Amino acid sequence: MKQRKQHITIHDIARELGISGSTVSRALNNNPRISKSTRDAVQKLAKTHNYLPNALASSLRKGKGNTVGVVVPNINRSFFSNVIGGIEEILSTAGYNLMICQTNEKLDKEKAVLKTLLNARVDGILMSLSMETNDYGHIEDLLDRGVKMVFFDRIPEKLPVHSVVIDDYNVALKVTRHIINQGYNMPAHVGGSSEINVYANRQKGFIQAIKNSGKRLDERYIIETDMTRAGGAAAFEQLMKLRPKPDAVVCSGDLSAHGVLISAMENGLAVPGDLAISGFANEEFTAHIRPSLTSVNQKGNEIGQQAAILFLNGEQKAEKRQIMVEPEIIFRESSKRIS
């Protein structure tokens, strides 16, 4: 038995029938300019050989492929994977496919993946900025080209773009107030780059809580890191050299908080007895380590859903809109001194 060709192309059909590739293309699309006999012959041969159209090539020709790009710093963070899940839940029902890219927190990678998505002619881009992003020229270029964009979590605040965020300022203030109310007198803050809106706002919330409590603000106790476990460990070492030593560390991320926690326990400190620790993002591990880690549930799935709805309903040139999702503070063992 003759084996069927698995990946027949328009040019294969054209060659077998002795016609041009453009004629085959028109016949497959039932163009009335092509005779019925030719259309029937082309479609019969295509069916016999299990011909499948090249969706990407078709989208490039039409300028529309029902594909949306999603750009995140790290796919393996549960927050961002939950955001992607929320986006997919809404956009798939609207007939869109997702093209997911990660930047690994690198500005150069962010620029490269945006260029790839532009070349693929996606119908729009939903994204969160990398840790290194401190200028927006590459994003402004896409906006000037008319690319529809929605941002979530880490956003370019000065650009006229639609976005979905949480109230990082107030939730950080509440977490810090909780720490102080538990009887801790010298809290420190470990955050990310203040060039990024979420980390800047979390730091501001921490500072305001310190001021509200009547405590003196000492900027030596505010440290910016790369938000990794190693960054948290390095911040712990730096903080332990201060006098007086901090008795609490409010972190802007769970990985850096875990780094602080590991270092504290390796140095014989009791958590929360000697040192209170809180994180941010409610990564899955936070509930399972001991002591369990106080954190903030940013509701990534809801953020993703709202970003997708904003993409579907928002006009790019309309006045920028910002949707704010209400987060939830999860108080756990690492910050509870008073029961």
Image (spheres, helix red, strand yellow):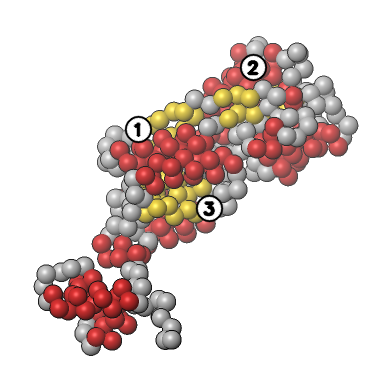
Q: Residue at x 37, y 61 (%)?
A: 120
The type of residue carrying mark 3 is: Gln
Q: Residue at x 67, y 22 (%)?
A: 331
Reading the image, the residue beneath label 2 is: 177
Task: Specify the quadrant that holds the C terminus.
Answer: top right
Q: Residue at x 26, y 83 (%)?
A: 14
28 sits left or right of 186 in the view = left
Q: Quadrant of residue 65?
A: bottom left
42 sits left or right of 108 in the view = left
Q: CA distance from mark 1 to mark 2?
A: 30 Å
Q: CA distance from mark 3 to mark 1?
A: 25 Å
The type of residue carrying mark 1 is: Arg
Residue 321 - label: 1
Q: CA distance from mark 2 to mark 3?
A: 35 Å
Reading the image, the residue beneath label 3 is: 102
N-terminal label among 2 and 3: 3
